[in-house]
């Protein structure tokens, strides 16, 4: 029996031409696409999408990625979907994308507790294949030995396929984070419940990691043009480090990321004075659990 798969696709001021390409690449592979629009005062161009098997939910404001994804997931679960696929608004998929993810899932479902299956990602800005990452001896390690499905520590949400019954066990996305670290937090929560996140190198999709890529200390580092993204990344990492029920390896990784983000944010921002204020506000808000938008 063919699996019933719903796509939850969150939009925010989308480029309609690119969004159409995204939809066209998925519509024949899934049962239904649920678009949850986070555009303030709604994206009216969505009314003219000429596709069947699409439902659009307008939120009429930006409530954050996690809130929008949860709305879509709950709608999909109410219609008894077997799997939920998360997608960004600008990702283009191959015509056998779903089949390849299901191949990985079915290969390991009898001997692994699978929370999600995801592709490997290529960063659009640097055009580099991103490594798989996994925890070992309290360290987060990377591997570029991309030959078979592997258990990893976390993946980004776009392209991630999740069995519908997992949400009742792991829970929904943490809405208070608003944006940034939402997918990682959910993956880590699954790991702590002894589920596994599988990543398959048989599928590669392109993803924009940051606004552009800059070489710092010999490494390509993703940089966000929007200073508020720096705020959310640092605030949420600080909150998770102090207040989330994570294991030692996860907390050590968060501490390392915080120590890395602070100088990168400062060095790559034009207005240094504003960035210093933003860094301190991010750290303070994370510490006192001032979350949301």
Image (tube, rainbow, N blue to C red):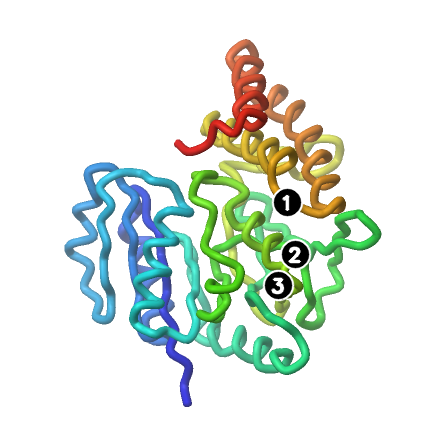
> What's the residue at 19%, 38% (across, down)?
41
Ranked by sequence position, the earlier of labels 1 and 3 is: 3
Quarter placement of the C terminus? top left
Mark-to-mark CA distance, 2 and 3:
11 Å
Q: Quadrant of residue 204?
A: bottom right
What residue appears at the point 71 percent right and 40 percent down from the top-left corner?
251
Q: In screen coordinates, is 99 left or right of 13? A: right
Task: Give the numbered dot on residue 245.
Answer: 1
Residue 95 in percent (x, y) is at 43, 74
Q: Residue furthest bottom?
A: 1
* Residue under the point 17% across and 46% down: 44
Q: What numbered label is drawn on residue 192?
A: 2
* Chain-order first, disc 1 or disc 2: 2
Q: Nearer the viewer, mark 2 or mark 3?
A: 2
Report helix, strand or loop for mark 1: loop
Inter-mark Cα distance, 1 to 3 = 19 Å
Q: Residue at x 69, y 30 (%)?
A: 260
**Above or below: residue 273 compared with residue 285:** above
Give the quarter of the figure containing the N terminus. bottom left
Left or right: residue 41 versus residue 35 is left
* Image location of residue 230, percent across then percent down: 53, 29
Q: Given contact means CB atoms under 8 Å apart, are the residues at marks 1 and 2 in contact?
A: yes
């Amino acid at each position: 029996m063919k699996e019933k798969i719903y796509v939850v696709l969150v939009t925010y001021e989308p480029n309609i031409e690119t969004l159409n390409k995204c939809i066209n690449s998925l519509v024949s592979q899934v049962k239904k696409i649920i678009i949850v629009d986070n555009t303030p005062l709604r994206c009216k161009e969505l009314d003219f999408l000429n596709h069947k098997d699409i439902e659009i939910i307008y939120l009429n404001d930006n409530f954050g990625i996690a809130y929008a994804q949860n709305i879509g997931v709950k709608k999909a679960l109410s219609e008894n979907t077997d799997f939920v696929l998360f997608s960004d608004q600008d990702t283009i998929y191959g015509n056998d994308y779903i089949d390849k993810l299901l191949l990985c899932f079915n290969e390991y479902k009898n001997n692994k507790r699978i929370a999600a299956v995801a592709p490997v990602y290529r960063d659009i800005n640097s055009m580099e294949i991103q490594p798989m990452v996994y925890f070992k001896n309290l360290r987060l390690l990377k591997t570029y030995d991309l030959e078979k499905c592997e258990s990893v520590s976390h993946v980004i949400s776009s392209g991630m396929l999740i069995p519908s019954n997992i949400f009742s066990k792991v829970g929904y996305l943490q809405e208070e984070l608003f944006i940034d670290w939402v997918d990682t937090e959910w993956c880590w929560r699954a790991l702590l419940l002894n589920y596994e996140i599988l990543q398959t190198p048989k599928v590669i999709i392109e993803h924009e990691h940051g606004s552009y890529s800059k070489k710092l200390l010999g490494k390509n580092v993703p940089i966000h043009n929007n200073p508020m993204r720096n705020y959310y990344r640092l605030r949420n990492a600080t909150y998770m480090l102090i207040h989330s029920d994570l294991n030692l390896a996860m907390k050590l990784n968060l501490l390392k990321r915080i120590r890395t983000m602070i100088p990168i944010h400062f060095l790559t921002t034009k207005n240094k004075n504003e960035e210093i204020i933003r860094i301190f506000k991010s750290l303070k808000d994370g510490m006192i659990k001032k979350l949301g938008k």
